[in-house]
Amino acid sequence: MVSSSQKILVTGGAGFIGTHTVVQLLKGGFHVSIIDNFDNSVMEAVHRVRELVGPQLSQNLDFTLGDLRNKDDLEKLFSKTKFDAVIHFAGLKAVGESVANPRRYFDNNLVGTINLYEVMAKYNCKKMVFSSSATVYGQPEKIPCVEDFKLQAMNPYGRTKLFLEEIARDIQIAEPEWRIILLRYFNPVGAHESGKLGEDPRGIPNNLMPYIQQVAVGRLPELNVYGHDYPTRDGSAIRDYIHVMDLADGHIAALRKLFTTENIGCTAYNLGTGRGTSVLEMVDAFEKASGKKIPLKLCPRRPGDATEVYASTEKAEKELGWTAKYGVEEMCRDQWNWAKNNPWGYSGKP
Ligand code: UD1
């Protein structure tokens, strides 16, 4: 049964995908408890969530400053509240940083998650929605990517996602009462339509859309286009960009599936649109949405990048009853609305 009083622990709930999902959870009638260590997020984002859902629904939201690497932080939460499920976002995701400092990635992503499973098991909370990534497909041999493809990691960050998928499968096989959904995100972009929530990366962005956004507001001079000689329609690489609100709704669909499907086991779903867009097409769409010119510098390919990646959406459509609603135009519209209202992100200062 899915009842409105269900209590969901959201790790990393102050982050980009976390905040958008928490808004949808609260609007869907769930009670939410966030744990976040503010490694790449800020308290202001949680205040904005409260502002968006209003005082009434805000009463259903708790926040704890804590770190999954510290088991005591989890113990304190679980001993106080009986959670019905966990949505586990908390983790690091910068590929370059993971190559330079793999221990930091293994510590945060692996140790943090293993602690979480331990404490969940102890308190008999055995339903989990896990943030995986299309990175587990590596350089896919075929497209669209289908969930039963052979998996492959290209870097330490990707390895943490791959290991964590394997760990989830092993735990569920050993203890069949677990219900685990692994959500493989393609390229999350866009922002809440209110312009109050969005992505606010620390330092120079690694990913395409936050970078374009910072060029548009004058924080960065130009966009480096990594690769213009790919065998694609315009020479730039192709990805499956997905609006963060669609992604958020995908988590609600996954959660409902967990609550209603006794024998779900441990299973993966792609969250993408099934459509590929090139870097240059994305720039073009953003220029149209913002009315800003994005100066470009054509650069060599970024090591490890695939030519073309997009999702097969069939499994999520069929089993979760979920499909992405938004296209590239809405993604760029909402991303720009967030950028122009918050050119320096949540802090409001350079
Ligand atoms: C990247 C990671 C992926 C991770 C995801 C997290 C790699 C190889 N993959 O995905 O593992 O899960 O971020 O969000 O790093 N681009 C530019 N200029 C830029 C930035 C990006 O041209 O300044 C291009 C890239 O070469 C790529 C496309 O834009 O073709 C998308 O890049 P990005 O946003 O970093 O996402 P992915 O590389 O797909």
Image (spheres, rainbow, N blue to C red):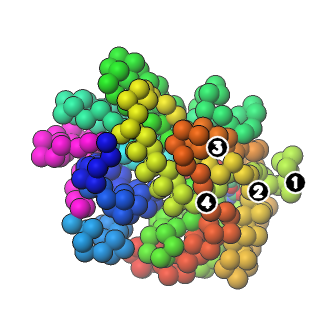
Cβ–Cβ below 8 Å for labels 1 and 2?
yes
What amino acid type should be assigned to the residue bearing mark 2? Ser
Residue at (40% x, 61% y) in the render? 24
Specify whether residue 229 is in view: yes
29 lies above or below 274: below
Q: Nearer the viewer, mark 2 or mark 3?
A: 3
What amino acid type should be assigned to the residue bearing mark 4? Lys
Q: Secondary structure at mark 4?
A: loop
Q: Secondary structure at mark 1?
A: loop
Q: Quadrant of the N terminus?
A: top left
Residue at (74% x, 52% y) in the render? 276
Residue 252 position within the rendered picture, expressed as x and y whole percent measured from the top left: 43, 51
* Marker disc for residue 325: 4
**Structural distance between the alpha carbons of marks 4 and 2:** 19 Å
**Structural distance between the alpha carbons of marks 1 and 3:** 23 Å
What amino acid type should be assigned to the residue bearing mark 3? Thr
Residue 112 position within the rendered picture, expressed as x and y whole percent measured from the top left: 32, 38
Q: Is residue 52 left or right of residue 60?
A: right
- Residue 101 belongs to the span the image colors magenta: no
Question: How many other residues sit within 10 Å of disc 4, few (<14), some (14-19) or many (≥20)?
Answer: few
What amino acid type should be assigned to the residue bearing mark 1? Arg
**Structural distance between the alpha carbons of marks 3 and 4:** 12 Å
Residue 320 position within the rendered picture, expressed as x and y whole percent measured from the top left: 52, 43
230 lies above or below 212: above
Q: Secondary structure at mark 2?
A: strand
Mark 3, residue position: 313
Question: How many other residues sit within 10 Å of disc 3, few (<14), some (14-19) or many (≥20)?
Answer: many
* Marker disc for residue 198: none
Mark 2, residue position: 278
Q: Quadrant of the C terminus?
A: bottom left
Q: Nearer the viewer, residue 2 or 293?
A: 2
Chain-order first, disc 1 or disc 2: 1
